[in-house]
Image (tube, rainbow, N blue to C red):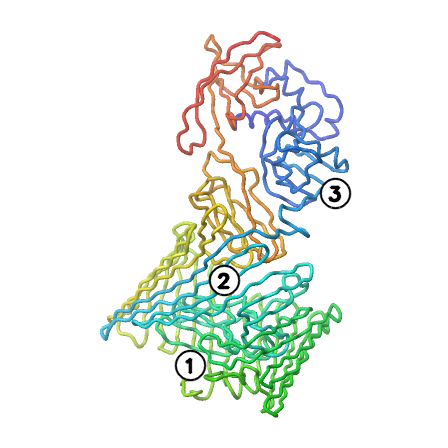
Amino acid sequence: MIGRRLLLGAGLCLLPGPLLAAALEFDEAQLRRRGLDPAMARYFSEAPRFTAGERRVALYLNGRPLGRVLARFGAQGELCFDAALLRAARLKAPAGAGEGGCQDFLASYPNTVVELQPSDETVRLVVSQQALATAPGTEGGFIQGGSAGLLNYDLYGARQQAPWGDSQQVFGNTELGVNAGNWMVRSRQTFAHANGRMRSQWLSTYAQTSLAERQAILQLGQINAHNRVLAGVPLTGVQWLPETALSRGARRLAPIEGIAQGPARVEVHQGQALVYSTLVPEGPFRLDAVRPLNRQQDLQVAVHEGSGEVRRFIVPIASFSAAAPAPAGLALALGQARGYGGYRTATPWVGSISQGFALSHQRSLALAAIASADGYSGLGLALDQQWATHTGGAFSVATAQWGGVAGLSATAALRHRFGERLSLSSSFTQRSPGFTDLAQTLAQGRYLGSAQRTQSVALGGSHPGLGGYSLGYVQAFGGAASRAVNLGWNRNVGALSLSARLQRDISPAPREHAGRRYRERGGTEFYLSATVPLGGGTRLGAFARDSGQGLQLGSSLSGRGSDRLGYQVQAAQGQRQPGTDLGAQLNWQGSAARVGAGINDNGAGVRSYTGQLSGAAAWHAEGVTLGPAALGDTFAIATVGDVPGARLDTPAGSVWTDRQGRALIAHLPAYRDSEVRLATPSLPRNVDVNSAAQSVRAGRGAVAYVDFAVQRARRLLLTVRKPDGTAPAKGSAVLGADGQWVTAVGAAGKVYLLDANAHRVLRVQLEGQRHCRLHFNLPALAGEQHYQTAEAQCLEEEPA
């Protein structure tokens, strides 16, 4: 720090380039009177340059920031293209270059532009495309391959103590898998244990590989048949489908929204297939990642509350058709129908095919067919059209034949934006009495078929005075009949945040299907909240809610004890309860798992305890690494030297390194650039990192390795004395072994070294051509001190 201030104080490197282009002369006497060594003036007289040695700089490549890296500069301030810099900038090494020393990169790529900005500590490189290197294991600019085994788990448990008896339940989802050689294998299971009864299900096992050059995915095993238009079924077989990550212009999917009365498991089914499953906390939830399998079957959402209650509602598939058209490409599936998640079905052979065509930038067409060995057949067509910048729609029609009876299904969807603040979407589906899904013909037990007619409308927008709002209405008749309306609103008033959600089921009566009675309709769920920050990450909130058990008013206090620990305490009073409902919740994210624990007392003798544990484990070449989030198709293993507790900001959220300095990056977007950034404040004070940011582009199914090279620097503050006990003159240059300028002597003979290990031979330039060499002993390492201190003797040397 002392050396840097002296250097900046000289002001020499800040002079405009045109002035420095000419030879400059300095008044050495004047410089000495100001405490500056004339050697510094001679060094900076020709051009603005970095001092010789290593410096941390901001690196830009072709205008794109690559983060801060540790760069080396030569005796004349020139940039050293060593192996570390080439790796950080993803540049090709010159032919015949080794790992050590500076390489003649400019001779191999003479068009390279190197712009050094020492005043901003910035280096800007402009290179040709031929100089850019692909990472090891990459083809087409993305990482491929890598191998690792994995386990994902999400467990939730609840125990209730009440005057009428105790109860407990545990349920969870697990996933086993392996990635190797651009293939991935996944196997999903679910289990539930309630009051001494255990129920488990093996949901599916399949293998998959991505064929990037064909923009396709190949699947083998227990799969869900994807068809652009028609409803498929779970199969044991083989499937070819488009790689959506390589499709252009795909729109976002329509969200699924609801309210949970407490921590709950949410399942989304389409026909017999479980499309999506997750755990949600108490209050409103929103699911943005649900991808339907086809355009014919409505989605059935089941909210499994911790109390054991199961609430269900329908999301029309036409609302998804209005949000996301099918991508172009071929989808082909062949296999034997299978039971799924407890459903019993016949098992004939089934073939499914669909083909999407991009007719133009604003129009797409999909054709589809499906057939089974026991006589079912279906044909379909879907058209998506963008008529204007803000207006578009979709239309699909399907016909099916079974047992000599034919039927027809038609769906229309419309979307329109009224400027930038208001959007409207609507959909309509009508099925004739003879239309039958393939799954319905195979069912041997309970089956919830799609409704004969569904209608939906959704309005969403924002207003400078009113805030953000959404309104939705859905009605379905026949089969899985329902009728519901929902309303959402949010607004910020200064620091105060307000939000509300109303969900009203207005279906006329309870229903019974296949001897099983479902929850009575007609319920209303309401949630209103207001929160205000108190500072330090703490928020005070108030809420009103009604989930069919009467109005309940309460308040909450939430915040974070650290980056990893969150908490919430709340108290509520209801119309139908005699006492005050008190609750507390703690959530902690470690380097190995996420843990949640809660307690609630309703004031009437009922107390409940909840716990949640989720995370992942990866087996790889370096050992076993644990992580707090489930691993996706494409993930990475990051290493920060051997530094534990370092924080990484990733596309899947923040994670911390374990005792070996490793961390799991749970998800990387396939075939897309994503950045992994190391939070340098989380590093020990004596640790430096070459580059704090790395860009990763990985193909689906790859296991990427992200290595942050770190160095444990020894920052040292020397107190220098000559043999007569006096200190060298303030401003005297401190030179390295090859004569390069390192720093300057400060007041009272203080010399600050950024890394004493890098400068074992140091000399101080005295008056004339005389020098004295510094002799000092490095103190013993002591924890993670910012710097250490030592005494140094400066013994004069004879002129060479």
The amino acid sitting under disc 1 is: Gly
Find numbered disc 3 in the image and state the secondary structure of the residue it sits on.
loop
Residue at x 45% of width, y 32% of height: 786
Work out how far the residue at label 1 is from the one at label 3, CA to CA, in angstroms: 65 Å
Q: Residue furthest left?
A: 163
Pointers 1 and 3 in contact (CB under 8 A)? no
Residue 60 in the image, given as x and y percentages of width and height: 66, 41
Work out how far the residue at label 2 is from the one at label 3, CA to CA, in angstroms: 51 Å
Mark carried by residue 548: none
Neighbourhood count class around disc 3 (C-alpha, 10 Å): few under 14, some 14–19, many 20 upward:
few
Mark 2 vs mark 3: which is more N-terminal?
A: 3
The residue that label 2 is drawn on is 493
Residue 636 in the image, given as x and y percentages of width and height: 54, 51
Find numbered disc 1 in the image and state the secondary structure of the residue it sits on.
loop
Work out how far the residue at label 1 is from the one at label 2, CA to CA, in angstroms: 31 Å
Residue 211 in the image, given as x and y percentages of width and height: 65, 60
Find numbered disc 2 in the image and state the secondary structure of the residue it sits on.
strand
Where 648 sits versus 745, above or below? below
Pointers 2 and 3 in contact (CB under 8 A)? no
The amino acid sitting under disc 2 is: Val
Where 558 sits versus 277, above or below? above
Q: Nearer the viewer, residue 353 or 372?
A: 372
* Rendering quarter of residue 432: bottom right
Quadrant of the image containing the C terminus: top right
The residue that label 3 is drawn on is 128
Q: Which of 1 and 343 is in front in this view?
A: 343
The residue that label 1 is drawn on is 523
| Of the two numbered discs 1 and 2 in the rendering, the one whose residue sits closer to the viewer | 1
Left/right placement of residue 757 relative to residue 58 reads left
Note whether residue 509 is visible: yes
Residue 400 in the image, given as x and y percentages of width and height: 62, 86
Neighbourhood count class around disc 2 (C-alpha, 10 Å): few under 14, some 14–19, many 20 upward:
few
